[in-house]
Image (cartoon, rainbow, N blue to C red):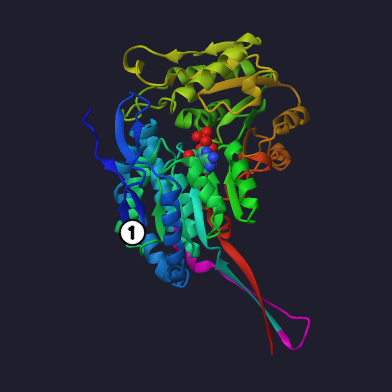
């Protein structure tokens, strides 16, 4: 493949290369090909971008919401118009099937539309005073400059979910995308430039995670950190942000239970599980990680699941018929294979798949067969840790109270799924599960206007809808003596 031109980053309205002169190659995980080369900076670019965002905040935060919205509407249109192009970039840099990538891009566009509208509804309040000579007014104001850090698994939408509400609220932003997926972020920022945002309002720093992250936590001009990624890094950022009592919102790891009761519609449950487990090759924080099936239907359910998987085409995400793409890199593949091996050693029975795919079209990529493991127990890594891959471990259960206890027995609390046709049970489970998101007879519960976020070590704060805007607002109480 021909060597690409080095792609720069976007700071203070200018396309800039890193002072250190370093570059980073971006690889397609389906083929091992280099699909782009980007300039790779560090704290120097982060400092410049933060200074620009700080300067821009002075005027951006004072615009009326309607004026800010104009740019957000424009960006929404531009993203929709470039849907196919953005989807192709996502697919090339991280392997996501094209159909899913297009869905992701539309989701990102929808965030800009939603927050263009929501920006106009940042209401305050007046509160009746206890004293005749005073009046109480409450206003909401943008928190300030935001440092946003995003992962590779939804490289466009994770950016949208942070910067759309931040910009709507009147904040300015410095974004650091993941190392493996800077190309889609760069294209998105070209559209941001086209949408006419004033210089310095939105800045893109492609650079070393520790160096840029440290600048975000230590530079007093950053007032808020919005992060999606691992629980490990989320904790580091929260700890470092505590030194200046910076606001943080964190979307971290998950370990989602998916519970199928004996009265469930098994075909709907199989489709729901397919969505929640195999979308993005199992690389989503809301992916099912433990499948609990009532013992009365476990055999019937397993058979239907295997039949469904036989129909799923694994391949390069850029092929139209692909349903399951590669894993993002060697490390991700190794972890998934390690979880399968560990389950095998501890008595798990692989009833479908179970290996890396290496022949023909799979030879150069990080492909793993969709896999189903029966007879799983809680000693196995797969029942304890986030697998982040296309593997379903089945744990049979008998009793509702016991399955709730097992489902909640984890430090994570992002998403949980329940399939049952008993209405009372739907409510009991929805309330008893200690998770920020519960899909009841729904394997794909996310929408732009709904609050997305976790309990426990899955995070803090919410993205989506009004809740997502709140994260970028301060509350000010003004007392008037009259
Ligand atoms: P994953 O395991 O999904 O890659 P990470 O938490 O490692 O999750 O990465 C998510 C994002 O966090 C990426 O943009 C990555 O570059 C960034 N990141 C990783 N380590 C740090 C760090 N020490 N400080 C700030 N950001 C980091």
The quadrant the N terminus occupies is: top left
Q: What is the number of callouts on the image?
A: 1
Is residue 278 placed above or below 142 in the rendered structure? above
Secondary structure category for the residue under label 1: loop
Q: Nearer the viewer, residue 140 or 279?
A: 140
* Magenta extent: 114-134
Whether residue 432 appears in this view of the structure is yes
Residue 465, x across and y down, in percent: 53, 55
The residue beneath circle 1 is 13
Question: Does residue 132 show up magenta in the picture?
Answer: yes
Residue 211, x across and y down, in percent: 49, 44
Residue 404, x across and y down, in percent: 73, 32
Asked whether mark 1 and ligand 1 are closer than 8 Å, the reply comes as: no
Residue 78, x across and y down, in percent: 31, 54
Mark 1 is surrounded, within 10 Å at the Cα level, by few (under 14), some (14 to 19) or many (20 or more) other residues, namely many
Which image quadrant for residue 457? top right
């Amino acid at each position: 493949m021909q060597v690409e031109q080095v792609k720069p980053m976007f700071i203070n309205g200018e396309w800039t290369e890193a002072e250190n002169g370093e570059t980073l190659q971006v690889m397609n995980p389906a083929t091992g090909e280099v699909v782009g080369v980007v300039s790779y900076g560090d704290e120097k670019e982060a400092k410049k971008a933060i200074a620009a965002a700080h300067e821009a905040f002075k005027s951006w935060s004072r615009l009326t919401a309607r004026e800010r919205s104009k740019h957000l509407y424009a960006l929404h249109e531009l993203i929709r118009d470039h849907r196919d192009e953005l989807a192709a970039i996502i697919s090339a840099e991280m392997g996501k099937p094209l159909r899913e990538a297009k869905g992701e891009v539309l989701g990102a566009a929808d965030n800009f539309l939603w927050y263009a509208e929501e920006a106009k509804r940042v209401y305050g309040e007046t509160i009746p005073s206890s004293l005749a000579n005073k009046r109480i007014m409450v206003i909401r104001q943008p928190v300030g400059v935001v440092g946003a850090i995003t992962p590779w698994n939804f490289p466009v939408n994770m950016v949208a979910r942070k910067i759309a509400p931040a910009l709507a609220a009147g904040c300015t932003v410095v974004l650091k995308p993941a190392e493996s997926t800077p190309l889609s972020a760069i294209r998105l920022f070209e559209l941001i430039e086209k949408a006419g945002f004033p210089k310095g309002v939105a800045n893109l720093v492609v650079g070393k995670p520790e160096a840029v992250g440290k600048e975000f936590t230590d530079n007093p001009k950053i007032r808020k950190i919005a992060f999606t990624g691992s629980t490990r890094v989320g904790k580091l950022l929260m700890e470092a942000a505590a030194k200046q009592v910076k606001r943080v919102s964190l979307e971290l790891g998950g370990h989602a239970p998916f519970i199928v009761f004996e009265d469930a519609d098994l075909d709907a449950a199989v489709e729901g599980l397919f969505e929640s487990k195999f979308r993005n090759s199992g690389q989503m924080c809301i992916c099912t990680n433990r499948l609990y099936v009532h013992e009365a239907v476990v055999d019937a359910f397993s058979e239907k699941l295997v039949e469904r998987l036989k129909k799923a085409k694994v391949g390069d995400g850029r092929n139209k018929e692909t349903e399951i793409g590669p894993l993002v890199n060697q490390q991700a593949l190794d972890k998934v294979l390690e979880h399968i091996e560990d389950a095998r050693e501890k008595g798990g029975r692989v009833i479908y798949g179970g290996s890396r795919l290496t022949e023909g079209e799979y030879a150069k990529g990080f492909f793993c067969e969709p896999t189903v493991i029966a007879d799983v127990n809680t000693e196995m890594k797969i029942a304890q840790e986030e697998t982040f891959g296309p593997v379903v471990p089945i744990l049979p259960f008998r009793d509702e109270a016991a399955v709730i206890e097992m489902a909640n027995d984890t430090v994570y609390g992002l998403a949980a799924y329940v399939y049952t046709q008993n209405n009372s049970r739907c409510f009991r489970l929805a309330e008893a599960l200690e998770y920020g998101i519960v899909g009841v007879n729904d394997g794909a519960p996310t929408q732009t206007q709904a609050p997305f976020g976790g309990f426990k070590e899955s995070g803090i704060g919410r993205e989506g809808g009004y809740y997502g805007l709140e994260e970028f607002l301060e509350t000010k109480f003004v007392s008037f003596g009259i």
